[in-house]
Image: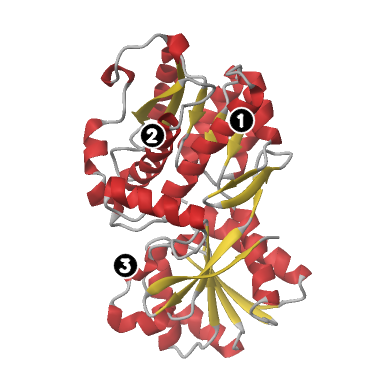
């Protein structure tokens, strides 16, 4: 998920990045017994800072709300957010600092590679860890105390194949995926496997590499097959280019995409909006969802940050409330009891209803977004 949000987030959040996080030293002095210490790790500076800042904003909003409403178990929450600069070694170093500080649970990391590194050490220590946005499968395989809030890459591939069959009536599908990306390839493979189970014929599968700009040769081959659906699971920078060139070679297929499409409108000139019109893609929530809880979250986020919350913001917000519910269910901050409570939780948040499966991955719904007139509109909520 490391590229899936709107670039407008960066400007609204530079202050947080400059501060390098919320440190215990910045807070009024309290004894350890009076607070519940929650650690967080994310990229607040560096090349992927926009994602860490967005996630941290959502997390901080949740913690502020929790403290304003009495805290957890009658205690205020002390949040310590450390910057790992998008680097796995820095992430482990940050984790160790938070352990020394006395955290009872960790929310983070944000991108997958640092999350894997942190999960390995958190599993050894048994400290409950919830990654809001790390999608790589082996993160939660590190230990029984490691959880994620976002759906995994294979899960969305399966759900999108089912959606293509049941909601779009697809009988034939072509795939256009990035051979250089574990994310793109992983989603594509899961889509193909589920499509075959659904009786959908895969009429073409073409690939490309990072940095490619010309996709017309592959798309021309696909156009000759005239598939009902063209599935493009990649990040928005590539997605927009592929969609435009698909229309240029005469492809009229319905385009379906993965959650990497979130942000694509910003990369497409308004004169080319027709190329992405009626594209359907997976996401973790929709700002257009009329659900009262979601609209209240958006309102509060905008008031605090003067910006619209991304999926990263929403997932981190949910992670905080999942941890709150688990500690209250356990009645203690004991790490084993909290991990057990997270495992057993049934939760309804901004990004949907969820429970955790045997591998600590969420069983949850996916929001389908439809692009209309250069805007992201809410289509439906679906699940496997």
Image mark count: 3
Query: How far apart are labels 1 and 3 at the CA level?
Result: 38 Å
Q: Nearer the viewer, mark 1 or mark 3?
A: 1
The residue pinned by badge 2 equals 64
Closer to us: 194 or 103: 103
Return the residue nearer the eye: 178 or 111.
111
Q: Position of residue 60 (x, y in %)?
A: 38, 36
Instruction: Check the picture and name the quadrant holding the C terminus.
Output: bottom right
Q: Position of residue 109 (x, y in %)?
A: 46, 35
Q: Position of residue 120 (x, y in %)?
A: 56, 27
Residue 206 visible within the image: no
Q: Secondary structure at mark 2?
A: helix
- Residue 265 in view: yes
How far apart are the alpha carbons under marks 2 and 3?
Answer: 31 Å
- Out of 84 and 286, give the one closest to the viewer: 286
Residue at the spot 77% in from the left edge and 75% down from the top edge: 199
Numbered circle sitting on residue 266: 3
Residue occupied by mark 1: 326
Dot 1 alpha-carbon crowd within 10 angstroms: few under 14, some 14 to 19, many 20 or more: many
Label 3: few (<14), some (14–19) or many (≥20) C-alpha neighbours in 10 Å: some
In the image: residue 145, left or right of residue 253: right
> On the picture, is 82 further left or further right than 170?
left
Residue at 66 percent across and 21 percent down: it is 337
User: Under tag 3, what secondary structure?
Assistant: helix
* 77 sits left or right of 203 in the view: left
Under circle 1, the secondary element is helix
User: Can you tell which quarter of the image residue 341 is in?
Assistant: top right
Left/right placement of residue 47 relative to residue 343 reads left
């Amino acid at each position: 998920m490391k590229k899936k949000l709107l670039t407008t987030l960066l400007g609204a959040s530079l202050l947080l990045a400059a501060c390098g996080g919320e440190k215990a030293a910045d807070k009024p002095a309290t004894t350890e017994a009076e607070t519940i210490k929650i650690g967080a790790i994310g990229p607040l500076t560096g090349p992927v800072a926009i994602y860490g800042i967005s996630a941290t904003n959502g997390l901080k909003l949740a913690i502020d709300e929790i403290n304003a409403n009495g805290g957890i178990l009658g205690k205020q929450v002390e949040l310590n957010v450390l910057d790992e600069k998008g680097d796995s070694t820095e992430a482990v170093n940050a984790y160790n600092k938070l352990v020394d500080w006395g955290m009872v649970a960790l929310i983070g990391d944000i991108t997958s590679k640092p999350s894997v590194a942190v999960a390995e050490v958190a599993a050894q220590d048994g400290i409950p860890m919830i990654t809001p946005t790390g999608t790589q499968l082996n993160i939660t395989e590190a230990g029984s105390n490691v959880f994620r809030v976002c759906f995994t890459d294979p899960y969305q591939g399966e759900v999108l194949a089912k959606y293509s069959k049941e909601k779009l009536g697809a009988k034939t599908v072509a795939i256009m995926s990035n051979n250089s990306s574990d994310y793109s390839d992983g989603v594509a493979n899961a889509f193909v496997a589920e499509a075959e189970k659904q009786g959908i014929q895969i009429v073409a599968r073409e690939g490309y590499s990072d940095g490619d700009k010309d996709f017309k040769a592959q798309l021309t081959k696909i156009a000759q097959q005239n598939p009902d659906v063209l599935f493009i699971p990649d990040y928005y920078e590539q997605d927009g280019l592929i969609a435009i060139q698909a229309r240029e070679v005469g492809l009229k297929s319905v385009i379906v995409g993965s959650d990497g499409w979130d942000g694509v409108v910003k990369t497409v000139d308004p004169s080319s909006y027709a190329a992405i019109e009626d594209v359907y893609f997976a996401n973790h929530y929709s700002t257009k969802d009329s659900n009262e809880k979601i609209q209240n979250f958006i309102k509060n986020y905008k008031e605090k940050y003067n910006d619209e919350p991304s999926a990263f913001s929403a997932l981190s917000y949910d992670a905080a409330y999942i941890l709150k519910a688990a500690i209250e269910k356990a009645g203690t901050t004991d790490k084993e009891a909290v991990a057990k409570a997270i495992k057993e939780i049934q939760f309804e948040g901004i990004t949907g209803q969820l429970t955790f499966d045997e591998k600590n991955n969420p069983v949850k719904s996916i929001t389908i977004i439809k692009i209309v007139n250069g805007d992201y509109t809410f289509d439906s909520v679906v699940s496997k």
